[in-house]
Structure formats: C-alpha cells, structure tokens
Image (tube, rainbow, N blue to C red):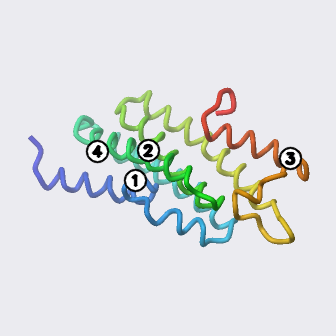
Amino acid sequence: DLPAGFIVGMVFMITGIAFKVSAAPFHMWTPDVYEGSPSPVTALFAIAPKVAAIALMLRVTYGAFGSIALEWSQVIIALSVASMVIGALGAIMQSDIKRMMAYSSIAHMGYALAGLAAGTHEGAFGVMIYMTGYVFMGAGAFSIIMSLRRDDAPVERISDLSGLSSTHPLLAAGMMVVMFSMAGIPPLA
C-alpha cells in the first residue's frame, strides 16, 4: 500500500501538468487565451509548451511513478476521455478560428494522453510520434491563419474562410490538408 500523501502528491503533479496541456477539466482558460492573443503568440503558445508539458508528463509518469502505473493510468484515462469529448464538442460550436483551434488542441491533448495511459513503452513511443505530428499540424494551421487577410484585416471568423478556394487556392488546399490531418484522416495524419 502506498502512503496517502504519496497518492495526493501524484494526483497534484498530474493535475498541474494537465492544466498546462489544457486537458479537461483544466481547460477553461485555453479558448480565451487563444482568442485574445495575437496569432503569432497563440501559435507559439499552442505548440511549444504543450509538447514540453507532455514530455514532462511522460517523464513523471513513466519515471517517478513508473512502478505504480495502475494508479496513475486511471487518472490519465479520465483526463484523456474528458479532453477528447469536451474538445471535440466545444470545437463544433465555435465561430472564431482561434477558439476552434483551442478546443481542437484540448481534444489533441486527450489523444496524446490516451497513449500515455497505456503505461507501456509502446504507448510512450506513440505519444512521441503523435506529438511530432501535432507540431506540424499546429504550425501549419497557424501559418495559414496568420497569412490570411480579408479587407486588410486578419481573418478571425470561420465564416471569413468562405470563398477561400477561389481567392487563394493554395492556402485553401493547405488548410484542407492541415484540417484533415487534425481530424485524423489517413494518410494525412
């Protein structure tokens, strides 16, 4: 049996890292920050800290808590499922591109946590592969979002993307590839 203080410390460490990666239910700040920040800051914020925090989560769970994977994997499974559901459903209801990307990142962190919850080396390897793809998906999406302008103003609404294929066919094709990749459509994922 593990001491109660150890279990509480483990839960607090996982909770702190879950807040950093925007895993549900610690995700509430993410859409507001994404929407309110300039797009280059949002792009950086959407990628670098999440990759670093997932790496830290791997190190903490597989390293410090590796011998008690059964205990921490239950917490990770709950965070993963909640993040996938809340992220996907939240993204559907958005009209702002950056808010949609925020909810998308919440769902993507749920996918990464699903691999982590396996508690195996294969699961950790899968998380590393997934996060590599996430870097390219996020960088591609935000690069296109930052390059789009309508009436000399940055594009912020999803409705502003209407007619993009006729005005900017290459950007539209790039956005299609990135969005299909984020949706997990093979072979783009």
Q: Distance between the residues labelled 1 and 4?
A: 12 Å
Secondary structure under tag 1 reads loop
Give the alpha-carbon distance from disc 3 to disc 4, as whole Å. Answer: 43 Å
Measure the C-alpha gap from mark 2 to mark 4.
Answer: 16 Å
The residue sitting at 74% across, 39% down in the picture is: 177
Amino acid at circle 4: Val
Which residue appears farthest toward the right when viewing the image? 167
Could you tell me the amino acid type at mark 3?
A: Ser
Q: Which of 30 and 97 is in front in this view?
A: 97
**Disc 3: which residue:** 165
Q: Mark 1 points at which residue?
A: 24
In this view, 93 is above or below 119: below
Q: Badge 4 local density, few (<14 within 10 Å), some, or many (20+)? A: some
Question: Which quadrant would the C terminus be assigned to in this image?
Answer: top right
**Kind of element beneath mark 2:** helix
The image shows residue 40 at horizontal and vertical percentages of 69, 65
> CB under 8 Å between callouts 1 and 2?
yes
In the foreground, 99 or 89: 89
- Mark 4 element type: helix
Which residue occupies 77% across, 55% down?
Answer: 161
Residue 100 vertical position relative to residue 63 in the rendered view, above or below: below
Residue type for callout 1: Ala
Of label 3 and label 2, which has the lower sequence position?
A: 2
Residue 3 location (% of width, % of height): 10, 49
Task: Of the two numbered discs 1 and 4 on the same chain, state the one appearing first in sequence.
Answer: 1
Report which residue position mark 4 lands on. Answer: 75
Residue 137 drawn at (x, y percent): 66, 45
Q: Do the residues labelled 3 and 4 touch (CB within 8 Å)?
A: no
Q: Which of marks 2 and 4 is nearer the N terminus?
A: 4
Distance of label 1 from label 2 (alpha carbons): 9 Å
Which kind of residue does numbered mark 2 sit on? Answer: Val
For label 1, count other residues whose C-alpha is less than 10 Å away and answer few (under 14), some (14-19) or many (20+).
Answer: many
